[in-house]
Amino acid sequence: MRGTVWFVGAGPGDPELLTVKGRALIERAGAILFAGSLVNEAATRWAPPGCVIADSKEMTLPQMAAWLIEQADAHETVVRLQTGDPALYGALIELVQPLDAAGVPVRVVPGVSSAMASAAAAVESFTLPEVTQSVIFTRVEGRTPMPPGEDLAALAAHRTTLCIFLSITLLHKVEAGLRAAGWPEDAPIVVVHKASWPGEERIVRGTLSDIKQRCRDAGIVSQAMVLASPTLGARHWPDLVKSKLYDPGFTHRFRKACA
Ligand code: SAH
C-alpha cells in the first residue's frame, strides 16, 4: 500500500504555531521534507526516532517530487513542511502534479500564514468598520511576472489592506505602486521581520515616505512582510467606529438589543 504525502503548513516560525493536526502528523511521520531556508527546523523536533528528515533547500522541484514519491513507497505518512500556509506562494501545485501522476495520495493541512502572524506581532487588525473590509495578499514583480491587472498601483487603488509578500528588497516598487494609486506620503506602513520567530521578530513602523530608509537602518533585507493599510495604528485612534456586532443597539442571532 502506498503512503500519503501530507503538505503541512508549518506556520510562520514559532513552532508553537503549528496546528495540532500538523504536529500529530509529524509525530507519526516516516519521512519529512522541510524547506530549510524558511521553516523553523524546530518544527521537526516532534519527529519519531528513525524518521527520515531531509532539507529541500538544495533540491530542485523534480528532485523533491522524486524524493516524496520514493518515501511514499516506504512509509504510510510522509510530510512536506511548508512555511506559513501551503496555499500562498508555496509551489504546492507544482509538487502535487507529479504526485498525482505517480498515483500518490495527497492531503493538505493549512497553516498560520506570515500575514496573520505579522498582524498579531504588530497588534493590528486588517479590517475595521467603515475603514476597510477587504484584504489583498500580493507581491510586487520580481523574477515572477505579475499577471495583467495585478500591478500594485491597480490593487492599491482599492484603498484596502495590502499584505505584500516577497517584496522587502523591492520596497522602491512598493512605494511607486502606492504613490501611483494616490496614497499620501504619511500613509502608515508596517514591516515585520521574522514574525513569531522566538527572539528574532522585529517590527519597523514608518510611512510611505520613510519606510525604505527605516528598513535599511534596521538592516532588514529578508523574510519580512510589508503591510500597507488604512487600518494601521488604529490602536491609538480616539474616534474608532465600533463594530456593529458588539453594539448595544444591534440585535443578532446570539443577543437582543439592549435599548
Ligand atoms: N506560505 C507562506 C509565504 C511563503 S513566501 C505564508 O503563508 O506565510 C515567503 C514570504 O513570506 C517572505 O518573502 C515574506 O514576505 C513572508 N514571510 C514568511 N515567513 C515570514 C515571517 N515569519 N515573518 C514575516 N514574513 C514572512
Image (cartoon, rainbow, N blue to C red):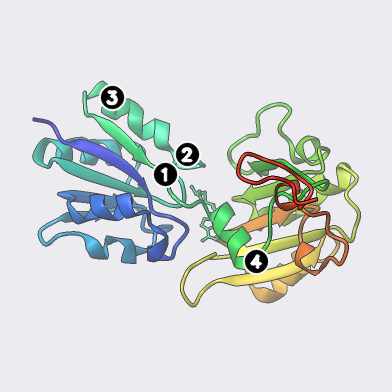
Going by the numbered disc 4, the residue's amino acid type is: Ala
Who comes first in sequence, dot 2 or dot 1?
2
Q: Nearer the viewer, residue 195 or 176?
A: 195
Q: Are marks 1 and 4 in contact (CB under 8 Å)?
A: no
Whether residue 259 is situated above or below residue 92 in the rendered picture: below
* Tag of residue 122: 4
Instruction: Name the outermost residue toward the bottom.
Output: 199
Horizontally, is 7 left or right of 200 in the view? left
- Asked if residue 84 can be seen in this view, the reply is yes
- Gap between marks 2 and 4, in whole Å? 23 Å
- Quadrant where the N terminus is found in the figure: top left
Going by the numbered disc 1, the residue's amino acid type is: Pro
Mark 4 or 3, closer to the camera: 4
Mark 2 or 4, closer to the camera: 4
Task: Find out if the beta carbon at label 2 lies less than 8 Å from the nearest ligand 1 atom.
Answer: yes
Who comes first in sequence, dot 4 or dot 3?
3
* Tag of residue 110: 1
Task: Find out if the beta carbon at label 4 lies less than 8 Å from the nearest ligand 1 atom.
Answer: no
- Gap between marks 1 and 4, in whole Å? 22 Å
Find disc 3 in the rendering and name its residue: 100
Q: Residues within 10 Å of mark 2 (few under 14, many from 20)?
A: some
- Gap between marks 2 and 1, in whole Å? 8 Å
Residue at image location 36% in from the left, 58% down from the top: 36
Task: Find out if the beta carbon at label 1 lies less than 8 Å from the nearest ligand 1 atom.
Answer: no
Residue at image location 51% in from the left, 74% down from the top: 200
Find disc 2 in the rendering and name its residue: 87
Mark 2 lies on a secondary structure that is loop
Q: Position of residue 12 (x, y in %)?
A: 47, 58
